[in-house]
Image (cartoon, rainbow, N blue to C red):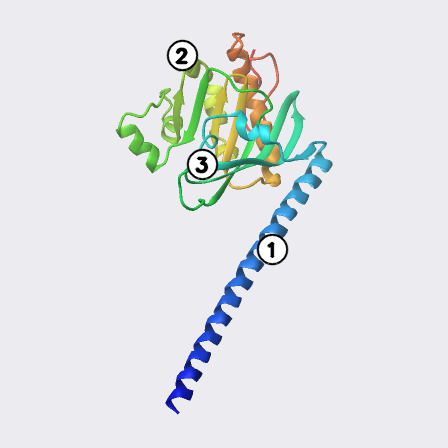
Amino acid sequence: METFAHRYGIFRFMGTFVALVLLVAGVVTFTIAAARVMKRGRSQDAAQWAEANGWEYVGNDSTLAQRWSGRPFGVGLDHEARDVLRGSVDGYDIVSFTYTWRSGSPNARRPGLRRSAHVVALDALPGEPVVDLSPEGLREKWQKLFGAQDVQIDNPAFDGQWLVRTSDEVFARRALDARLANIVMLPDFHGSRLRIEGPSVLLWRPGRTDVTTLTERAKRIADVARIVLPLEKGGPRFETGGRIDGFGIPGLT
């Protein structure tokens, strides 16, 4: 009886173990399949949005993942640009894509988590000068305590919301006059980071491409470009004419 009971216990244990293995395998398989379906659905949404709005859906473009060097670019592993969309807004060529990467380093034993950011940018090669605006959260406040650069423009609302780092403080102060300082206080910029790199302007936030906000975000890129590109090229402070939706001052000359 003891031998039978012993064997019966082993069989029960093995049966439970096999059931657990099959359950885990089923969960993993379901998760992978669900992720693929969601990815396919997002790509279809992006393609449909492009067709409806006169943009071009490209899919993947590996060159975009290597074009810029500031955050979110240049960190982690396995950089990719997915769901790439190209279009034109007010005469400016705009590109939108989901940038993905894995956290960690090449020497890590296990690959890190896959992370993503929705990037909307002028479709131009970056250069100098660089002006980077990031929301001033707790981490940024700590960085400032330890000497991190922050260009102040004597606008309490702006200075309290944005941490400004730049390679050219003179250029940054010229660009961040009342018009641009007020634009970046609009809701379209909340939770996002803005970076000017010479002839390139990009706006990004964590997460995947959100086509429901893409039209407005693309317009904001054009708004910023309209102000800073003439400065970057050594031209006048503002281009002639035009107005910016959501900002009550008409175009300046």
Residue at numbered disc 2:
170
> Residue at coordinates 26% horizontally, 28% vertically from top-left?
146
Name the spot of residue 213 as percent of width and height, x first.
Answer: 59, 38
Place residue 82 in its image quadrant.
Answer: top right
Residue at numbered disc 3:
76
Whichever of labels 3 and 2 marks the residue nearer the N terminus, that label is 3
Residue at numbered disc 1:
33
Whichever of labels 2 and 1 marks the residue nearer the N terminus, that label is 1
> Residue at coordinates 39% horizontally, 84% vertically from top-left?
6
Other residues around mark 2 within 10 Å, as few (<14) / some (14–19) / many (≥20): few
Q: Amino acid at mark 1?
A: Ala
> Residue at coordinates 53% horizontally, 67% vertically from top-left?
22
Q: Amino acid at mark 3?
A: Gly
The answer to whether 158 is drawn above or below residue 230 in the figure is: below
In the visual, does 159 lie left or right of 118?
left
Label 3 to label 2, Cα distance in Å? 32 Å
Other residues around mark 1 within 10 Å, as few (<14) / some (14–19) / many (≥20): few
Residue lying farthest to the front in this orientation: 3
Tell me, yes or no, if residue 9 can be seen here: yes
On the rendered image, what quadrant is the C terminus found in?
Answer: top right
Name the spot of residue 149 as percent of width and height, x first.
Answer: 33, 23
The answer to whether 56 is drawn above or below residue 238 in the figure is: below
In the visual, does 93 lie left or right of 5?
right
Tell me, yes or no, if residue 249 can be seen here: no
Name the spot of residue 44 as percent of width and height, x first.
Answer: 68, 44
Whichever of labels 1 and 3 marks the residue nearer the N terminus, that label is 1
The answer to whether 114 is drawn above or below residue 23 in the figure is: above
In the visual, does 214 lie left or right of 13?
right
Mark 3 or 2, which is nearer the eye?
3
What numbered label is drawn on residue 90? none
Q: Amino acid at mark 2?
A: Val
